[in-house]
Image (spheres, rainbow, N blue to C red):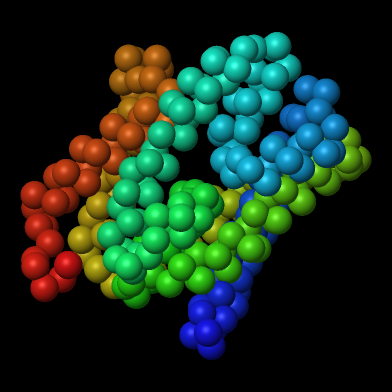
């Protein structure tokens, strides 16, 4: 129990920078919700059960336009499909004896930043560490949304826009340490950046959603990395 509590508090500590970044981004999202007619309670519930900026922004647009449930479901599946890949990759880093229900509980808060933080932990990743991350990041995301709805019109637009930069800075801070220690990770990061940039140059890419672009890049780059640097049996 002591080990679980220690991992849980460490998760809260490591998740605090992520929560601050989430707060800044979701504040901007709250303003979008306010402009679309959502009230603070609706924004709170949405952000507590759907921790994805692109997914929520798209959902708010569909709600504002009076879209159907089917349109909403397809839209969310396409935008957030990358989290299936992240969850599958994370699965092998968890304790093999972890039950399906507890794995699903860990997977509830798998986001880009949470995944990067969990995957960098010593294996097997503690489920309590993941719970600690969720305990601070989900409230941070939800609180920013609510305050954005309530107070969004008070702050100047330039300040609201600048707040969003915090999340990108935080994500870079998560990626850089492991990249400095392992040249393979650094190479994968650089190739990913190059691939993402090339997608912006290709005309046909303008017809592909951001979620699908990430899926394509993830599958191609991870497959190449697996061929070039296969994982040895003892490393598994």
The residue located at (29%, 66%) in the rendering is: 96
Could you tell me residue 71's position as x and y percent? 55, 15
- Quadrant of the rendering where the C terminus is positioned: bottom left
Q: Which residue of the protein is positioned furthest toward the bottom in this rendering?
A: 2
User: What count of labels does the image hold?
Assistant: 0
Could you tell me residue 65's position as x and y percent? 70, 12
Q: Say if 4 sits above or below 206 in the image.
A: below
The residue located at (58%, 52%) in the rendering is: 167
Q: Is residue 180 visible?
A: no
Find residue 153 and report its image quarter.
top right
185 and 76: which is toward the camera: 76
Find residue 6 and report its image quarter.
bottom right
Could you tell me residue 94's position as x and y percent? 35, 65
Q: Is residue 144 left or right of residue 116?
A: right
Q: Is residue 41 left or right of residue 179?
A: right
Q: Is residue 186 visible?
A: yes
13 and 199: which is toward the camera: 13
The residue located at (56%, 32%) in the rendering is: 55
Q: Say if 136 sits above or below 234 in the image.
A: above
The residue located at (22%, 43%) in the rendering is: 221
Q: Is residue 11 left or right of residue 164?
A: left
Could you tell me residue 29's position as x and y percent? 70, 37
Q: Say if 209 sits above or below 221 in the image.
A: above
């Amino acid at each position: 129990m002591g080990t679980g509590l220690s991992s849980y508090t460490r998760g809260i500590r490591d998740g605090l920078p992520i929560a601050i970044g989430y707060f800044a981004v979701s504040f901007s999202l709250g303003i979008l919700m306010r402009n679309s007619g959502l009230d603070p309670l609706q924004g709170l519930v949405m952000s507590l059960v759907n921790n994805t900026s692109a997914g929520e922004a798209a959902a708010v647009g569909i709600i504002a336009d009076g879209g159907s449930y089917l349109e909403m479901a397809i839209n969310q599946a396409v935008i957030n499909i990358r989290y299936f890949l992240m969850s599958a990759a994370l699965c092998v880093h968890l304790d093999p004896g972890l039950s399906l229900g507890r794995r699903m509980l860990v997977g509830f808060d798998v986001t880009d930043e949470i995944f990067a933080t969990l995957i960098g932990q010593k294996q097997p990743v503690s489920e309590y560490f993941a719970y600690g991350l969720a305990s601070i990041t989900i409230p941070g995301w939800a609180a920013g949304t609510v305050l954005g709805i309530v107070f969004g019109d008070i702050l100047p637009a330039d300040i609201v826009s600048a707040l969003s930069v915090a999340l990108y800075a935080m994500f870079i801070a998560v990626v850089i340490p492991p990249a400095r220690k392992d040249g393979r990770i650094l190479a994968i990061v650089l190739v990913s950046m190059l691939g993402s940039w090339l997608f912006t140059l290709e005309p046909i890419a303008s017809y592909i959603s951001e979620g699908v672009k990430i899926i394509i890049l993830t599958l191609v780059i991870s497959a190449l990395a697996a061929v070039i640097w296969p994982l040895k049996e003892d490393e598994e």
